[in-house]
Amino acid sequence: KNEVEQSPQNLTAQEGEFITINCSYSVGISALHWLQQHPGGGIVSLFMLSSGKKKHGRLIATINIQEKHSSLHITASHPRDSAVYICAALAGGYQKVTFGIGTKLQVIP
Amino acid sequence: NAGVTQTPKFQVLKTGQSMTLQCAQDMNHEYMSWYRQDPGMGLRLIHYSVGAGITDQGEVPNGYNVSRSTTEDFPLRLLSAAPSQTSVYFCASSYGTGAGELFFGEGSRLTVL
């Protein structure tokens, strides 16, 4: 079974800070997914990547397949970025998906 | 498009009662799935379906039943609720069966007394 670990589990940042959330997994995967869970509970997809780097607005996701590691970066953080960020490792489709526990981010004005 | 619609949002049951969580999507997605989210744990896959008439078990299927009679709907049934099934449940769908973007419903908070 794939083990997925996220760090840190909790993160408090000042508005404007650069934020990094890490995700490590134990077995080879076909893709990695970053999700955002809002305080109200809804979950939205941020990125899906299998190699390299993707950028969307102030969010950047990277993955190193050899090191079994992915990072999610938030530049110029804002209070509206406050949420739980979850990574999910896919070992050949969603029937073989393992989710991390999540990183709870709070951005203070 | 409404996306993925889950109902109800909140439900309280007594041990032994049955209920169905409804999930519908209007994106013509082949893949649909149910997850449960518990404190201190990642989302766990309960059941999934890769198309109408096809369902399979995930990591934690015991106590749950599913069916997929149409592409749009994927209900989750609890036949005899137990306190261990107190959780937040999410339905999700995706185009194809591989690793496309996952679309989640808003979640259903279930309490079993």
Image (cartoon, helix red, strand yellow):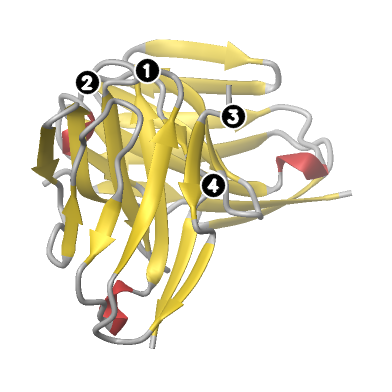
Badges 3 and 2, same chain:
no
Q: Is residue B21 left or right of residue A66?
A: right
Name the spot of residue B62 as percent of width and height, x first.
12, 64
Residue at the spot of label 1 = B28
- Amino acid type of the residue tagged 3 in the rendering: His
- Circle nearer the N terminus (2, 4): 2
- Label 3: how many Cα within 10 Å (few below 14, some 14–19, many 20+): some
Q: In the rendered structure, are the residues bearing label 2 and label 4 in contact, judged by CB atoms less than 8 Å apart?
A: no
Distance, label 1 to label 3, CA atoms, is 32 Å
Distance, label 4 to label 3, CA atoms, is 25 Å
Q: Nearer the viewer, mark 4 or mark 3?
A: 4
Q: Residue at x 32, y 50 (%)?
A: B35
Q: Residue furthest right?
A: A109
**B33 and A54: which is toward the camera:** B33
- Label 4: how many Cα within 10 Å (few below 14, some 14–19, many 20+): many
Q: Is A30 rendered above or below residue B46?
A: above
Q: Is A13 rendered above or below residue B80?
A: above
User: What secondary structure is found at the residue carrying circle 3?
Assistant: strand
Residue at the spot of label 4 = B106
